[in-house]
Amino acid sequence: MHAYPFGRMRCRWSMIAPRGLPPYSRTTKTLMGLGVIAVAGVALAWTLIMPEAPKPRDGYALVRLRTVEAQAEQIEGDYILLAGDSHVERLYLPQLCGLPTLNAGLSGATLAEVVPFLTAAKIRPPKLVLISVGTNDAHLKRAPNSDRSLNRFRRNFDELLSIPQWEATPIVISQVPPLRETDNPEFSATAIAAFNAIENDACDAGKCRRIELFPQDWHPTSPIVTANVAEAPGPLTSQESFHAPDGIHINRLTDRILAKSDEICGALAN
């Protein structure tokens, strides 16, 4: 048995390489690093161009979907579909255009969530669709004024108008309801105006019909205007306000829709 000086043993052990891990040259390591950077760059680009995937909302969307489907089974014959976000879900409008309505509003939903929700609904095609959506897309946490957000809204809106089940169904779009900005600084009125412009462009191209429930010069005491004076709900009283207390939802939205019923129902004749 031989004894080796400590320094010699250290030298010999340092020459032993772990099996399966051959040494890499500096060039190889550089190429591997560049490969990792390239993959990361592709992944980042993919996230920028792909639409935002709908996010689960604690199962509420699924519960709401099943409710809508169950109610649809109880309607005989033709019906009007009301779709969109909480502005619609809060709406009480049993009939429109002489037909029963099916309320498929989804509170808190963005346009990116409304589209798959309606696409997944197992309901027969409606006679007409009335939609109000866009408020939740205007939340500042979604950077609504960025080019990416505006392009995504435009893309999702095109998908909304192209839902296969609605191929022969007239679609009526309400503009995004105005907010009381002093109470809702977390929402962007500029983004809402941009969303309305996108919807206008699509309807001008013949893909939908636009309905103005809220005039550009609206005011909390403005009357709800209709062509038929006998059916006009009249101005809001001093005890009422244009908005609900949250400054987001609209008081008497049903009245505003009924005041425009001639325009809405006119889409059925086309």
Image (cartoon, rainbow, N blue to C red):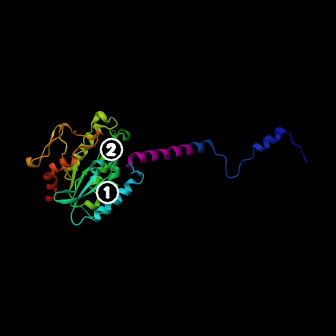
Residue 39 at least partly seen: yes
Q: Where is the C terminus found, in terms of image quarters? A: bottom left
Above/below status of 63 relative to 220: below
In this orientation, which residue lies closer to the viewer: 233 or 1?
A: 233
The amino acid on which the numbered mark 1 sits, given as a three-letter code, is Leu
Residue that appears at 11% across and 49% down: 231
Is 134 left, or right, of 40 in this rendering?
left
Q: Quadrant of residue 33?
A: top right
Q: Magenta residues: mostly which secondary structure? A: helix
48 is within the stretch colored magenta: yes
Q: CA distance from mark 2 to mark 1?
A: 17 Å
Residue 118, which numbered label?
1
The residue singled out by tag 2 in the image is: 137
Residue that appears at 21% across and 64% down: 78
In this orientation, which residue lies closer to the viewer: 15 or 89?
A: 89
Residue that appears at 28% across and 37% down: 189
Is 108 left, or right, of 44 in this rendering?
left
Badge 2 element: helix
**Start-end of magenta stretch:** 31-51
96 is within the stretch colored magenta: no
- Circle 1 residues within 10 Å: few <14, some 14–19, many ≥20: many
Q: Position of residue 110 (x, y in %)?
A: 33, 48
Q: Position of residue 106 (x, y in %)?
A: 32, 52
Residue furthest right as drawn: 1
Q: Position of residue 46 (x, y in %)?
A: 42, 48
